[in-house]
């Protein structure tokens, strides 16, 4: 029999936000795979590091951190085949994924390559979306409000249209687009309704009203949350971080 591939959601960064199931599977794993940059530490591995057995075989999936596009398909093709070789021997493979595997998670690329050949189990995790809302201390959405998740790199015209059609908005992948996004939201008279969170749940976390943020760029792990629905929700006047 072939092994099972587990896609483990680790949550946004705080190891205490891993689920009990995630901890159980990681701590008993014989083979662990995870995404890793071509320089520096794997964020996914760092979240789970205390749970990884010392004798586990590790398969880092090296994904270059670049602004421009790189041949990611080839990387996941190669990683999938290396993992498939292990699964074919009957061993399970536990794959680590920041946040949730199916919410902008890199695990989806392994899933689409291996799901027709092997049994796969997804272990959901706390998403950055809900983690940021918790740190911002304002609900995401309610009742019949429409929540829209928008990637920050999209053109202003597309972002504007999506925001206009929604009552609650999350803008992800803010990064180097921060100044442009602030200008757009200012033009839409939404700056005072927008909250900003970077590196949610980590020691270096920062939480601000977007209007108070005085930097020009943001890290990759940052998000803008906006509420413009019927509820009388406002942002706290200030944050401690």
Image (spheres, rainbow, N blue to C red):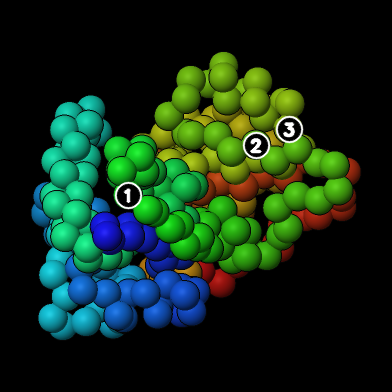
Residue at the location (44% across, 44% down)? 104
- Around disc 3, counting alpha carbons within 10 Å, would you say few (fewer than 14), some (14 to 19), or many (20 or more)? some
Local secondary structure at mark 3: loop
Residue 144 horizontal/vertical position (percent)? 85, 42
Distance from disc 1 to disc 2, alpha carbons, whole Å, reads 33 Å
Q: Which mark is residue 166?
A: 3
The residue located at (65%, 26%) in the rendering is 162
Q: Position of residue 88 (x, y in %)?
A: 19, 54
Q: Which mark is residue 148?
A: 2
Residue at the farthest front position: 1
Q: Earlier in the sequence, mark 1 or mark 2?
A: 1
* Pick the front one: 77 or 185: 77
Q: Residue at x 62, y 32 (%)?
A: 185
At mark 2, the secondary structure is strand
* Marks 2 and 3 close (CB-CB < 8 Å): yes
Q: Is residue 135 left or right of residue 50?
A: right
Q: Position of residue 108 (x, y in %)?
A: 38, 43
Quarter occupied by the N terminus: bottom left
What is the quadrant of residue 208 in the picture? bottom right
Residue labelled with disc 1: 118
Q: Nearer the viewer, residue 71 or 83?
A: 83
Can the viewer see residue 62? no
Indicate which disc, 1 or 3, sits on the residue closer to the N terminus: 1
- Report whether 185 appears left or right of 205: right
**Of all residues shown, which one is farthest toward the top?**
157
* Residue 160 seen in the current view: yes
Identify the secondary structure beneath mark 1: loop
């Amino acid at each position: 029999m072939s092994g099972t591939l587990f896609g483990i959601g680790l949550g946004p960064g705080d190891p205490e936000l891993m689920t009990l199931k995630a901890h159980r599977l990681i701590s008993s794993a014989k083979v662990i795979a995870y995404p890793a940059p071509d320089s520096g530490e794997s964020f996914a591995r760092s979240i789970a590091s205390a749970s990884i057995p010392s004798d586990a075989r590790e398969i880092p999936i090296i994904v270059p951190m670049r602004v421009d596009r790189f041949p990611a398909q080839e990387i996941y093709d190669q990683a999938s085949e290396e993992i498939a070789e292990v699964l074919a021997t009957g061993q399970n493979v536990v794959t680590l994924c920041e946040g949730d595997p199916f919410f902008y998670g890199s695990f989806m690329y392994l899933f689409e390559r291996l799901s027709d050949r092997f049994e796969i189990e997804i272990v959901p995790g706390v998403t950055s979306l809900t983690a940021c809302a918790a740190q911002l201390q304002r609900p995401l959405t309610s009742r019949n409000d429409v929540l829209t998740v928008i990637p920050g790199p999209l053109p202003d015209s597309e972002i504007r249209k999506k925001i206009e059609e929604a009552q609650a908005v999350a803008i992800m992948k803010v990064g180097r687009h921060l100044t442009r996004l602030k200008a757009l939201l200012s033009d839409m008279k939404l700056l005072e309704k927008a909250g900003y969170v970077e590196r949610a749940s980590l020691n270096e976390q920062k939480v601000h009203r977007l209007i108070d943020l005085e930097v020009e760029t943001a890290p990759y792990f940052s998000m803008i949350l906006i509420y413009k629905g019927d509820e009388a929700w406002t942002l706290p006047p200030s944050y401690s971080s």
